């Protein structure tokens, strides 16, 4: 299965998303008291009330996987997960693609707003809005609903060249670009030497040997590429803290560029 070895990002995210909390670098979270959780629910009410169809909904979980995903944003390391808000049967849902323990079948899912931005396990959430018109919004709904109806699978290869499987940021970017007929396009990020050095040791610890292509820079869509866009504006956001960090970062020992 060489497809998963093309570069560090898909392998590392696959590991962090499917580890079920058993990574030695994970720190046990301090449980929220009922009073703290109640206050956080009150704090996110304005966020819930601000959401409209077509909005980009972002969050950051309080775990090592979320820390890792957030770290691959290169302009602003704030969020780890993304979804699109759309109505269905008079209920507002967030449509997203994810893998791991929260979605073991790895097909596109939709969650109600409370579930997606719940403060139980999330320490940041935000609502962002693209400048799309009614016709573009209708096309966006059709595209995303078609993805959902076809049970679009999560792309563990993180390959932007294919459309039969997509990861979270890829699905949103491609849907918005198609709905707006490329009036809105998204910049991409590149794997950097720093990211490679930071995480390659983790791959080796798991006895995963990357291919020679791991040294190549490759484009990918990070969460910050979705909202740090001239056609997107912040509506509301709230930050309760930072995701758990590893006890120590793996070091780039004994690898070749």
Image: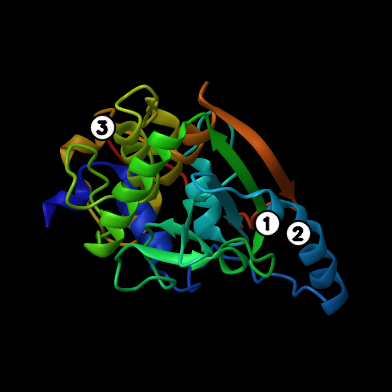
Q: Does residue 133 lie above or below 29 as drawn?
A: above
Q: What residue did someone put label 1 on?
A: 48
Please give left or right for residue 180 compared with residue 240 in the image: left
Residue 100 x/y as whole percent: 38, 67
Q: Residues within 10 Å of mark 1 (few under 14, many from 20)?
A: some
- Per the image, label 1 sits on a secondary structure element best described as helix
Label 1 to label 3: alpha-carbon separation: 42 Å
Q: What residue did someone put label 3 on?
A: 215
Residue 147 x/y as whole percent: 27, 55
Q: Does residue 205 lie above or below 167 as drawn?
A: below
Looking at the rendering, in which quadrant would you find the N terminus? bottom left
Please give left or right for residue 41 compared with residue 143 in the image: right
Q: Residues within 10 Å of mark 3 (few under 14, many from 20)?
A: some
Label 1 to label 2: alpha-carbon separation: 5 Å
Q: Earlier in the sequence, mark 3 or mark 2?
A: 2
Residue drawn at (30%, 66%), measured in percent from left and top?
A: 106
> In the orientation shown, which residue stands out farthest toward the right?
35
Tell me, for residue 45, which label it has, or none.
2
Label 3 to label 2: alpha-carbon separation: 45 Å
Please give left or right for residue 15 compared with residue 71 in the image: left
Asked whether 5 or 239 is in front, the reply is 239
Q: Earlier in the sequence, mark 1 or mark 3?
A: 1
- Per the image, label 3 sits on a secondary structure element best described as helix
Q: Nearer the viewer, mark 1 or mark 3?
A: 1
Residue 173 x/y as whole percent: 37, 37
- Per the image, label 2 sits on a secondary structure element best described as helix
């Amino acid at each position: 299965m060489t497809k998963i070895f093309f570069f560090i990002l898909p392998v590392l995210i696959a590991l962090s998303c499917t580890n079920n909390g058993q990574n030695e670098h994970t720190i046990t979270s301090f449980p929220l008291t009922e009073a703290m959780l109640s206050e956080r629910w009150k704090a996110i009410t304005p966020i819930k009330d601000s959401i409209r169809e077509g909005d980009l909904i972002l969050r950051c979980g309080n775990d090592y996987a979320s820390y890792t995903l957030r770290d691959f944003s290169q302009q602003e390391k704030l969020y780890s997960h993304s979804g699109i808000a759309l109505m269905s049967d008079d209920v507002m849902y967030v449509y997203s693609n994810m893998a791991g323990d929260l979605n073991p079948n790895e097909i596109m899912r939709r969650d109600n707003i409370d579930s997606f931005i719940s403060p139980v396990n999330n320490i940041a959430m935000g609502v962002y809005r693209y400048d799309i018109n009614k016709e573009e919004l209708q096309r966006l709904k059709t595209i995303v609903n078609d993805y959902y109806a076809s049970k679009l699978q999560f792309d563990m290869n993180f390959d932007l060249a294919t459309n039969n499987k997509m990861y979270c940021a890829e699905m949103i970017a491609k849907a918005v670009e198609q709905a707006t007929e490329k009036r809105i396009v998204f910049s991409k990020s590149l794997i950097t030497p720093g990211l490679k050095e930071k995480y390659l040791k983790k791959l080796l610890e798991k006895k995963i040997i990357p291919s020679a292509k791991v040294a190549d820079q490759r484009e990918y869509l990070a969460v910050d590429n979705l909202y740090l866009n001239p056609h997107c504006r912040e509506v509301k956001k709230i930050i309760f803290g930072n995701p758990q960090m590893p006890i120590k970062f793996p070091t780039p020992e004994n690898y070749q560029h």
